[in-house]
Amino acid sequence: MSSDTRPHATDASSREESSQPVLALEDVEVHFDKEQRSLSSLFSEPETVKAVDGVSLDVEKNDVVVLVGESGCGKTTLGKTAIGLQRPTGGSVRYRGQDVWDAKDKNGDVEIPHEEIRRALQIIHQDPASSLNPNKKVIKSLSAPLKRWNPELNWHDRIARIHAMLERVGMSPPEDYAGRYPHQLSGGEKQRVALVRALLMNPDVILADEAVSALDVSLRIEMMDLLLEIQDVFNTSFVFISHNLSNARYIAEHADGRIGIMYLGKLVEIGPAEEIVNNPQHPYTKVLMWATADLIPDLDKAVDPPVRRIDIPDPVDPPSGCAFHTRCTKAREVCRHETPDQFDTEHEEHQVACYRALENHEYWQSESLDDE
C-alpha cells in the first residue's frame, strides 16, 4: 500500500499562488426574511434577521481561524458564506482574488471557475452522519471524490489511497473500516470518515462546524489534535466554529491561529489566542470567559455575570449603535448611537470593535449607562 496520504494536486490546485489571501471577506452581510407564522403577518412586511452584518475577514494559506459566540450570533452563517455555501446579500467573498458568486453566475471575466472553487472549499459538519449515505459503505462514499477529481487513478490506486488516508486518521485496520456502513461506526469514527472525504478533495480551506461538540469529552482533545495534525501535514486552512471558548483556545493556541468573537452578526474582536484569553478588550469577550469555567478556574461563579442583562436582544430588532450596549456594564451614551469599527490594539494582530480601545474618543466623556 502506498504510504503517501497527501491528496495529489490537480491542475486546478497547482495554480500559481499569489500573496493574496486564500479567502477574503469584505463587509459581508447575510440578511434573511424571518419566517411568517401568523395570519396577520401575511399582510405586513417581512421582518429581516441580520445574521451577518458587515464582517471583513481574511483567511491566509495554512491559517486557522476559530469563530466563537453564543447560539444565534451568526458564526455558522458566516462560516458557510466564507466557503460559498451561503450567498451574501451584501459585500463580497473572494477566493484567491476571484469573486465566488461572480464565478457561480459566470458574471464578467472569470479567472477561476466555480467548480474549482467548490473543490477548494470544503466542510465537515457537527453531525457527520447527515452527510454520509446510510446505504453506502465507507469505501463507496470515499471513492466518489477521487473518481471526480482524480480520474487518472484506477480502482486499485483509489483503494490504496483511501486505505492510506483511513490509516492516517487512526482508523486501522483500514480494510475493516472501509467495508462498514455508517451505522456501524461511532460518532468519532464517522467524523474521521467525513474528514477523509473532505481531504480527498485536496481543499485549500475546510470549515469545521462544531466538529467536536457532539463527541464525548474524552474524545474531543483527541479529535482536535487530529485536526491540528492534519492542518499541519496537508497545509490546509481551517475555519472552526465553536460555542466553547476553551476548545477555541486549544485549537488556536496549538495552531498559532486566531480567535474571532461574534455577537449579533458582527465580529467584535479577533486576535491570537493568547491575546484574546489573557488580554480581552471587548466586554462581550469577558462575558464568554466568565462563562467558561476552566479559563478562569479561581472565579467564584456565584457572583453575577459581567452583564447588565442576561437575555440576548432579538436579531430582528438589534440595538442601535454598538449592539452589545444593552448588556454591557461599560456602556456609555455614545454607545447607543454610534457603531464602532475594528480598531487596532497594542498587538498588531489584535483588533476590537469597542471605543474603549481609543484613548481620546468621546466615549470617555460620555455619560455612563450604569444607572439604567
Image (cartoon, helix red, strand yellow):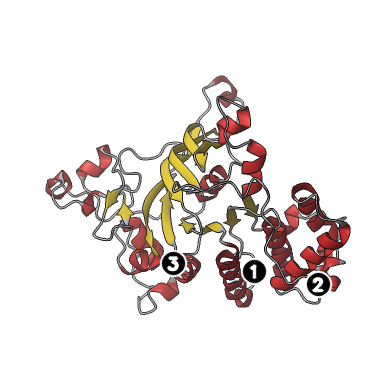
Q: Position of residue 259 (x, y in %)?
A: 43, 60
Quick one: label 1 or label 2, which is nearer the N terminus?
2
Residue flagged by tag 3: what amino acid is it? Asp
Q: Choose between 5 and 227: the one closer to the eye.
A: 5
Label 3 Cα neighbours within 10 Å, binned few <14 / some 14-19 / many ≥20: few
In this view, the residue farthest toward the top is: 43
User: Is label 1 or label 2 in front?
Assistant: 2
User: Is label 2 or label 3 in front?
Assistant: 2
Quick one: label 1 or label 3, which is nearer the N terminus?
1
Residue flagged by tag 1: what amino acid is it? Leu
- Residue under circle 1? 215
- Residue under circle 2? 1
In this image, 268 relative to 89: left or right? Answer: left
Residue 143 position by quadrant: bottom right
> Which residue: 56% across, 26% down?
41
Q: Choose between 109 and 265: the one closer to the eye.
A: 109
Residue 154 visible in the picture: yes
Label 3 residue SS: loop
> Which residue: 40% across, 66% down?
273
> Which residue: 35% across, 76% down?
300
